[in-house]
């Protein structure tokens, strides 16, 4: 987000990207629909790549092929029941104060010696899909008759569309048993390549000193996404991110 481009340029970029994708043989669909026909999707990837059509096309094609190979559209809880029952992660029932859906992960419930990597990865992708169900994706801007740019979401009762989710990692009692670099690499790839920009903020809550060594390995993988992370306390999450009574239960200390 953040770009307010000329509507003519936006339209040109969307059309160029559409034509590029139409020329790609055997391109998998996006959630049951041809990606080239989904202008919101095209505009999202263009914004992520700062309107570079070639980069957007390459990134979107890679995303679509991964979704096909990983069978994202067919993921369901039955494929990772043990992970789900352990409540290692969940989509919180309440949005944050900015209206963003929140994905919560509890580090101490994850054990690198006991987990099956594929199950953890499947659950991760499934929760990103469930968050995506709750997120909006705006259309490319159109030009007003007077020549001014107008967002497709603007109206008499316009509100800021919620295009990004909040990620919360509860790091209390983090130990080497939770230092799962293989899964962390998958998570970073998912956030950077397949759901680019969909987490607007990542909160690292009450991280103990032992986490710093693991963070030194993970942070470079995040590249510029590292700027989205913030080390916070539970009290800061309560004061700045959730309305009273809407905090994730674990962070309330229950």
Image: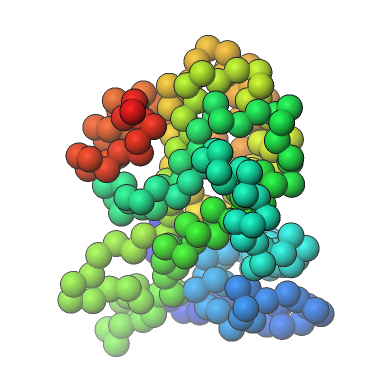
Residue 83 location (% of width, % of height):
61, 43
Residue 188 location (% of width, % of height):
64, 42
Residue in the image at 40% along x and 48% along y? 92
Q: Answer whether residue 16 is visible to the viewer in this image.
A: no
Residue 209 location (% of width, % of height):
53, 12
- Whether residue 164 sits left or right of residue 196 in the image: it is left
- Whether residue 78 sits left or right of residue 234 in the image: it is right
Residue in the image at 61% along x and 80% along y? 33
In front here: 117 or 5?
117
Classify 139 as above or below 222: below
In front here: 12 or 208?
208
Classify 165 as above or below 203: below
Extreme-top residue of the structure: 209
Q: Please, which colouring scheme is shown?
A: rainbow
Residue 35 location (% of width, % of height):
63, 77
In which quadrant is the C terminus drawn?
top left
Residue in the image at 75% along x and 76% along y? 27
Classify 79 as above or below 45: above
Instruction: Indicate the quadrant where residue 195 lies.
Output: bottom right
Q: Answer whether residue 254 is visible to the viewer in this image.
A: yes
Count of marks, rendered view: 0
Residue in the image at 25% along x and 65% along y? 159
In which quadrant is the N terminus drawn?
bottom left
In front here: 61 or 104?
104
Instruction: Indicate the quadrant where residue 151 lies.
Output: bottom left
Classify 218 as above or below 50: above
Instruction: Indicate the quadrant where residue 245 lies.
Output: top left
Extreme-bottom residue of the structure: 145
């Amino acid at each position: 987000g953040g770009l307010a481009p000329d509507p003519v340029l936006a339209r040109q970029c969307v059309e160029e990207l559409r034509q590029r994708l139409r020329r790609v043989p055997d391109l998998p669909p996006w959630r049951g629909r041809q990606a080239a026909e989904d202008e919101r999707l095209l505009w999202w990837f263009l914004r992520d790549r700062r309107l570079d059509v070639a980069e957007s096309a390459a990134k979107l094609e890679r995303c679509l092929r991964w979704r096909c190979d990983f069978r994202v559209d067919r993921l369901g809880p039955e494929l990772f029941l043990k992970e789900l029952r352990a409540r290692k992660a969940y989509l919180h029932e309440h949005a944050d104060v900015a209206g963003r859906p929140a994905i919560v992960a509890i580090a101490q419930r994850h054990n690198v010696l006991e987990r099956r990597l594929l199950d953890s990865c499947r659950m991760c992708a499934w929760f990103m899909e469930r968050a995506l169900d709750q997120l909006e994706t705006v259309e490319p801007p159109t030009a007003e008759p007077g020549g001014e740019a107008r967002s497709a979401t603007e109206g008499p009762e316009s509100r800021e569309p919620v295009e990004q989710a909040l990620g919360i990692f509860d790091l209390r009692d983090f130990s080497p048993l939770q230092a799962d670099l293989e899964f962390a690499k998958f998570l970073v790839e998912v956030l950077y390549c397949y759901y680019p920009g969909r987490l607007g903020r990542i909160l690292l809550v009450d991280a103990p000193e032992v986490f710093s060594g693991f963070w030194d390995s993970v942070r470079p993988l995040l590249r510029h996404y590292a700027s989205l992370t913030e080390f916070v306390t539970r009290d800061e999450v309560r004061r700045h991110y959730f309305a009273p009574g809407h905090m994730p239960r674990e962070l309330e200390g229950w």
